[in-house]
Structure formats: structure tokens, C-alpha cells
Amino acid sequence: MKKYLKPFLAVTAMVCSFVATTMASSACLLWYYQPEEPKSLQDR
């Protein structure tokens, strides 16, 4: 079991970093792209 633990941890770390990077970059893109507010929600 120990023989498989290090590669498993490495793959898990890579997947976690990839997910974190994707979420961070998509948050930036969503922050840049803010569509116009619908007329029904605007304060008049």
C-alpha cells in the first residue's frame, strides 16, 4: 500500500491545484464579464 501512496498523493495534489486554478480564473473572468442588469431589477 505504501508504494501506491506517494503517486496517489501527487495525483490528488495535481487535481486539487488544477481545480483551484480553474475556479480562480473563472472567478476573474466572471468579474470582468458582468452583463447588464435587467430592467426589472434596476432601481429607478
Image: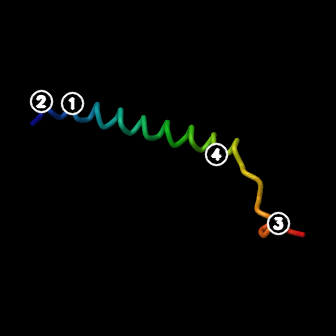
Q: Residue furthest left?
A: 1
In the rendered image, which residue does mark 1 sit on?
6
SS category of the residue bearing label 3: loop
Taking depth in this image into account, of 3 and 37 the one nearest to the observer is 37
SS category of the residue bearing label 1: helix
In the rendered image, which residue does mark 3 sit on?
42
Marks 4 and 2, the one that precedes in the sequence: 2
In the rendered image, which residue does mark 2 sit on?
3
Marks 1 and 4, the one that precedes in the sequence: 1
Marks 3 and 1, the one that precedes in the sequence: 1
- Left or right, 1 with respect to 19, comes to left
Q: Residue furthest right?
A: 44
Amino acid at dot 1 = Lys
Amino acid at dot 2 = Lys
From mark 1 to mark 4, how far is it between C-alphas? 36 Å
**In front: label 1 or label 4:** 4
Q: Position of residue 41 (x, y in %)?
A: 77, 68
Q: Residue at x 18, y 34 (%)?
A: 5
Taking depth in this image into account, of 26 and 16 the one nearest to the observer is 26
Marks 4 and 3, the one that precedes in the sequence: 4
Mark 3 and 2 residues: CB-CB less than 8 Å, in contact? no
Q: Is residue 18 above or below residue 34?
A: above
Amino acid at dot 4 = Leu
SS category of the residue bearing label 4: helix
